[in-house]
Amino acid sequence: MSRTYKNAKQFFKLFRELIKNNSFSRSTILLSFFLFIFTLALPIWRIVPFASTQPFIPLHYNVYFGVDRFGPWYAIFVLPILGFIFLILNVVLQVHFVLREKILTRFFAVSTVFIEMIFLVAMILIILLNI
């Protein structure tokens, strides 16, 4: 067997153990995933239908200068992509620390939820800016 196959097999074994034995991590991973899905679905629901009429949309609002960043409609998906990257990265780190450091596992679980919530709030504000 190759080393990569053994590492992947061990990773998925630890992931199953994390999901089965740790209800806190399981619930935070599911909550983070649903927040990510909502962050992804919101611009699909509110921005994509109007993409043909508005080629450029406001992407950032500053209190001092007003709208200070415009971009193409597909640039709004940067937030969900970043949210997915953080979700995957934090789940991998949870699996890595599940046997050695329980407190780090919980830290990464909670931080994933907070990061996804911040991205969701940012997406809601961008959607409100474009309505």
Image (cartoon, grey):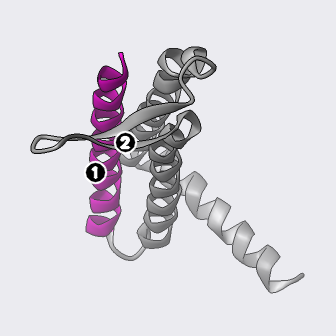
Relative to 25, is 131 above or below? Answer: above
Q: Residue at x 63, y 20 (%)?
A: 52
Instruction: Locate the C terminus by quadrant.
Output: top left
Residue in the foreground of this view, choosing between 86 and 22: 86
Q: Position of residue 117 (x, y in %)?
A: 30, 38
Q: Tell me the magenta residue range.
A: 102-131
- Left or right: residue 113 compared with residue 56: left
Classified by dominant secondary structure, the portion drawn in magenta counts as: helix
> Looking at the picture, which amino acid does disc 2 mark?
Thr
Q: Secondary structure at mark 1?
A: helix
Instruction: Locate the N terminus by quadrant.
Output: bottom right
Residue that extends furthest to the bottom in the rendered view of this protein? 3
Residue that extends furthest to the left in the rendered view of this protein? 64
Q: Residue at x 73, y 67 (%)?
A: 9
The disc placed on residue 110 is 1
The disc placed on residue 28 is 2
